[in-house]
């Protein structure tokens, strides 16, 4: 998968590209993360990309020309036009199911806005998907695009060492993940639940499923409406 990011602040992606699982996935050739500074496509000698909003109001708006020309340059040799994701608090809230679905694409373009946003005509011409990462306003689209790329990349085959790590994680089945423990068996007087030391796989599975349901009920009851629960589990919840 090739992630192309149109941004005025490409340096923000440096440590993201060089660290941990994303850094390794790039080195292994499983993904590429290319940042393109669309200021290069400015049509004036001062390389300005923004101007005052028509109609007045606070802040500056990014002009259409550099955005659209940058997009045309990135896609000029592509047979199929890729999806273009614009990061905005006005978008659809990004969910795990979106990360799984977007991981099937071969190319994605992320467009990062700043200031008061981007001229609507550029968005109309190139954007296919509007996404928000939550109901709060950030200073630009760079952090949200890193959040989305991270969440998408870990669903691409080979990016995580262990396929099972995406099989039983939070949001699979619309439940939160069960609690995890490692050594030592007793820490500051707190014991690891006995069932996890028993080696009895069926009991461990049962315990984990119960903990997932309890935790979801306690922390994210809104998810339970969409969760895939058995009749017995629903009865247990309603007790
Ligand atoms: N840009 C500014 N705030 C944002 C948000 N919450 N999600 C996505 N993009 C944004």
Image (spheres, rainbow, N blue to C red):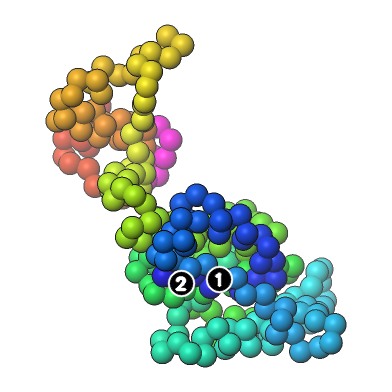
> Is residue 186 left or right of 85 when viewed as pictured?
left
Instruction: Say which of 23 and 218 sits in front.
Output: 23
Give me the residue at 27% from left, 46% from top: 164
Q: Is residue 218 placed above or below 154 in the rendered structure?
A: above
Residue at horizontal 57 percent and vertical 66 percent from the top? 87
User: Would residue 222 be counted in the magenta stretch?
Assistant: yes
Mark 1 and mark 2 lie on one chain; the one further toward the N terminus is 2
Q: Which residue is mark 1?
A: 34
Which of the 4 quarters of the picture holds residue 9? bottom right
Alpha carbon of mark 1 to alpha carbon of mark 2: how far?
A: 8 Å
Is 179 one of the magenta-colored residues? no
Q: Is residue 31 visible?
A: yes
Give yes or no for contact between labels 1 and 2 (Cβ–Cβ under 8 Å): yes
Eyeballing the image, is 125 above or below 101?
A: below
- Using the image, tell me which numbered label, if any, was put on residue 169: none
Callout 2: helix, strand or loop?
Answer: strand
**Camera-side residue: 196 or 117?**
196
Q: The N terminus is located in which quarter?
A: bottom left
Residue named by callout 2: 2
Q: Which residues are magenta?
A: 217-224
- Residue at the (74%, 67%) spot, across then down: 115
User: Could you classify mark 1 by the number of other residues whose Cα lies within 10 Å: few (under 14), some (14-19), or many (20 or more)?
Assistant: some
């Amino acid at each position: 998968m090739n992630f192309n990011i149109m941004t005025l602040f490409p340096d923000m992606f440096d440590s993201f590209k060089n660290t941990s699982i994303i850094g390794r996935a790039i080195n292994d050739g499983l993904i590429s993360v290319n940042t393109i500074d669309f200021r290069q496509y400015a049509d004036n000698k001062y390389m300005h990309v923004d101007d005052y909003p028509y109609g007045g109001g606070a802040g500056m708006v990014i002009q259409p020309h550099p955005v659209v020309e940058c997009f045309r340059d990135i896609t000029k040799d592509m047979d199929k036009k890729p999806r273009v994701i614009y990061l905005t608090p006005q978008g659809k809230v990004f969910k795990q199911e979106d990360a799984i679905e977007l991981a099937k694409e071969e190319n994605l373009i992320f467009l990062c806005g700043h200031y008061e946003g981007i001229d609507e005509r550029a968005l109309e011409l190139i954007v296919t998907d509007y996404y928000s990462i939550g109901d709060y306003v950030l200073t630009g689209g760079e952090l949200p695009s890193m959040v989305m790329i991270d969440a998408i990349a870990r669903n691409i085959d080979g990016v995580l060492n262990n396929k099972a790590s995406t099989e039983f994680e939070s949001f699979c089945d619309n439940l939160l993940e069960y609690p995890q423990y490692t050594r030592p068996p007793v820490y500051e007087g707190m014991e690891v639940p006995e069932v996890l030391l028993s080696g009895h796989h069926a009991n461990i599975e049962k315990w984990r499923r119960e903990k997932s349901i309890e935790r979801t009920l306690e922390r994210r009851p809104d998810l339970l409406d969409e969760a895939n629960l058995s009749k017995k589990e629903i009865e247990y919840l309603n007790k």
